[in-house]
Image (cartoon, grey):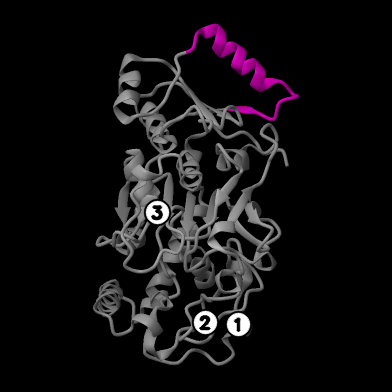
Amino acid sequence: MDADGQADHLKAYGITYYSLEKQLEVRWLLNYRGGSFLISDTEDLRRECQIRGVSFEVISDSKTEEILEEISSPSRNMETVELEKAPKIAVYSPQENKPWDDAVTMALEYAEIPYETIYDREVLNDALVLYDWLHLHHEDFTGQYGKFYRAFKTTPWYIKDKEEAEALAAELGYDKVSEEKLAVALKIRDYVVGGGFMFAMCSATDSFDIALAAEEVDIAEPMFDGDPSEPGYQSKIDYSNTFAFTDFILERSPMVYEFSSIDMTQKRQISAESDYFTLMDFSAKWDVVPTMLTQSHTRLVKGFMGQTTAYNPENIKANVLVMGESKLNGEARYIHGIKGKGFFTFYGGHDPEDYTHRVGDPKTELELHPTSPGYRLILNNVLFPAARKKKQKT
């Protein structure tokens, strides 16, 4: 999985998932040649690699022992993690997902990793217990329809989406979309607290935390829910309910395409050519989890925009780990934390290979980006629940 040795990093994750499905022995060699995978050799596996265009090497038992001995050396910042099972994956997304909507869905399909799509009905009917890993697509859990009102309120797709959301909320027994989305967010919270793995990108990250913080507060204006917001609602926000963020200031105006001070999009002053973020270095033997989540063939990852592009460090809780940051912009791009018995990872931006990502853009063709380090971070999270957990030492 290093830069020169792998022709298709993304499909390699699919091969690893395939190997877990076939109950082959799989080890993730953290920080060894870009986070390579050591898999028991079979003819079927070699054939599958060749079909999918994934580079591999066949090594002897003696070479295997040599590699494992090198990794185990206290002087090497490497570790071996056993992967035990193919996690069952759910993508929280509307059934009529637009082509530009979700980088994770594209990554899973390109890597040939199976998943199931669920949405509000399934979540509220407790379907989350069936899954090991949950991804939240580009979503607005505050019931403000992504705050697209100013730019798109008269467009057919916005009107249709709003009507469908209101109809679904009514069908499920809620007076407002904001109330129904809060109920969904609370179910997802309980899933994570109970031991689930949650991954979210773009506006699904901050809007999720905002919805939890505003559980008993009406923050939506009349064009969103039919009645005014509560007077002085900022003072009623409960930051103790959130996963990752604290002390944020909500954006009150419905005409501003922004949720709160968490997001750095409007504060950024950098050209696309200079926009990169750095993956943090962790001790593989002591901090196994963040080491898994930051495996890549490069520590420097190309930046990309989204409704929620990056996170204000001042609004990140002290117990949340920053795994990717841009010091030039003073922002966090990739963060991780523990909630109850479960884990969450938030990744800023919308599509790692579509820098500006505007509504209506054609979807990214991953065949053109098979070695994308930005997409590798997504797929690290997909395999994370497969790992045999070692107690974190720090």
Q: Is residue 14 above or below residue 117?
A: above
Of labels 2 and 3, earlier in sequence is 3
Secondary structure beneath dot 3 equals helix
Q: Is residue 356 in view?
A: yes
Kind of residue at badge 2: Val
Of labels 2 and 1, earlier in sequence is 2
Kind of residue at badge 1: Lys
Q: Nearer the viewer, residue 379 or 85?
A: 379
**Total tally of numbered discs in the picture:** 3
Of labels 1 and 3, earlier in sequence is 3
Q: Is residue 91 left or right of residue 260?
A: left
Q: Nearer the viewer, residue 353 or 324?
A: 353
Q: Is residue 97 above or below residue 17?
A: below
Q: Nearer the viewer, residue 189 or 247?
A: 247
Secondary structure beneath dot 1 equals helix
Q: Residue at image x 52%, y 56%?
A: 347
Secondary structure beneath dot 2 equals loop
Kind of residue at badge 3: Ala
**Whole-number angstrom distance, CA of label 1 to CA of label 3:** 34 Å
Q: Nearer the viewer, residue 303 or 343?
A: 303
Residue 102 place in picture, x, y as percent: 37, 57
Q: Is residue 244 above or below residue 50?
A: below
Residue assigned mark 3: 103
Residue assigned mark 2: 217
Classify mark 1: residues with Cα within 10 Å, few (<14), some (14-19) or many (20+).
Answer: some
Chain part drawn in magenta:
59-80
Instruction: Report if the CB atoms under discs 2 and 1 are less than 8 Å apart.
Output: yes
Residue assigned mark 1: 236
